[in-house]
Image (spheres, grey):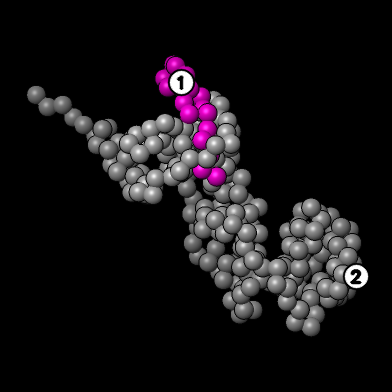
């Protein structure tokens, strides 16, 4: 735990000229006293962390020090592609992975480009939930998201009207539509010819991921499938009977 925090501290200092103890404490979610101890530990390990006192002081790296600990892990790289939807990342339990990925990318950039993430965030923002609707995160969403990432079959209980059904599903993808989460999945045992179905995440009452992985259908295109299903749904509700 501490090792990961020390690495993050180095990357933070590498991506910014100077950071105060308060700023580091906020980013690392620790106390300022812990920041002081961590800075001392880094210095003892040979990382040139320098503390400047005074009103404009703070911590910084000296001598143009650069760490090479910027390689992205697979989970961080995948989360980075979703970083434009911060609320969705938080609900799926991927916020920490995305934060680490953005930090590594920022540390690897040239100094003149390190403010790119801030300038972009000040110009574009995505607010997914619909108006006049209190967003609710389904309790089982992180478990479903884990299964989607790992291609693991899940045993699920699902509310259908007043009944509850049990299904073993192959979870292919998640879709966030106007603040509501949906799972696109195929019933296990029908691989190759079974239809893909859509389930609302908030209607799952239980989800348990097994150890068995399924082989994804390479022909499945999540955006295309969702667009087709959304069009079918729109046609089904926009019907009129004429006599």
Residue nearer the viewer, 139 or 183: 183
Residue at 48%, 54% in the rendered image: 126
Q: Is residue 169 magenta?
A: no
As drawn, which residue projects farthest toward the top?
162
Report the magenta residues as a range.
Answer: 150-168
Which quadrant of the view contains residue 91?
A: top right
Disc 2: which residue: 44
For label 1, count other residues whose C-alpha is less than 10 Å away and answer few (under 14), some (14-19) or many (20+): few
The residue beneath circle 1 is 165
- Identify the mark nearer the N-term, 2 or 1: 2
State the image quarter where residue 105 is shown. bottom right
Q: Nearer the viewer, residue 10 or 148?
A: 148
Residue density around tag 2, few if under 14, some if 14–19, many if 20 or more, within 10 Å? few
- Is disc 1 placed on a helix, strand or loop? strand
SS majority, magenta: strand
Residue 107 seen in this snapshot = yes
115 versus 76 height, above or below:
below
Residue at (79, 83) in percent of width and height: 63
């Amino acid at each position: 735990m501490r090792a990961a925090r020390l690495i993050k501290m180095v990357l933070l200092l590498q991506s910014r000229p100077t950071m105060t103890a308060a700023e580091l404490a906020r980013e690392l979610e620790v106390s300022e006293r812990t920041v002081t101890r961590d800075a001392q530990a880094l210095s003892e390990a040979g990382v040139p962390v320098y503390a400047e006192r005074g009103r404009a002081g703070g911590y910084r790296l000296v001598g143009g020090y650069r760490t090479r600990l910027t390689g992205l892990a697979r989970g961080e790289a995948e989360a980075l592609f979703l970083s434009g939807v911060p609320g969705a990342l938080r609900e799926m339990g991927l916020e920490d992975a995305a934060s680490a990925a953005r930090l590594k990318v920022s540390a690897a950039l040239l100094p003149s480009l390190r403010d790119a993430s801030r300038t972009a965030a000040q110009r574009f923002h995505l607010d997914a939930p619909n108006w006049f609707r209190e967003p609710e995160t389904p309790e089982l969403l992180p478990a479903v998201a884990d299964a989607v990432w790992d291609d693991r079959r899940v045993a699920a209980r699902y509310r259908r009207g007043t009944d509850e059904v049990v299904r073993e599903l192959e979870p292919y993808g998640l879709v966030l539509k106007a603040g509501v989460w949906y799972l696109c999945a195929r019933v296990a045992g029908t691989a190759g010819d079974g239809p893909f179905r859509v389930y609302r995440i908030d209607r799952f009452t239980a989800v348990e991921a097994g150890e068995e992985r399924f082989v994804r259908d390479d022909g499945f295109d999540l955006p295309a499938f969702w667009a087709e299903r959304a069009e079918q749904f729109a046609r089904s509700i926009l019907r009129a009977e004429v006599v």
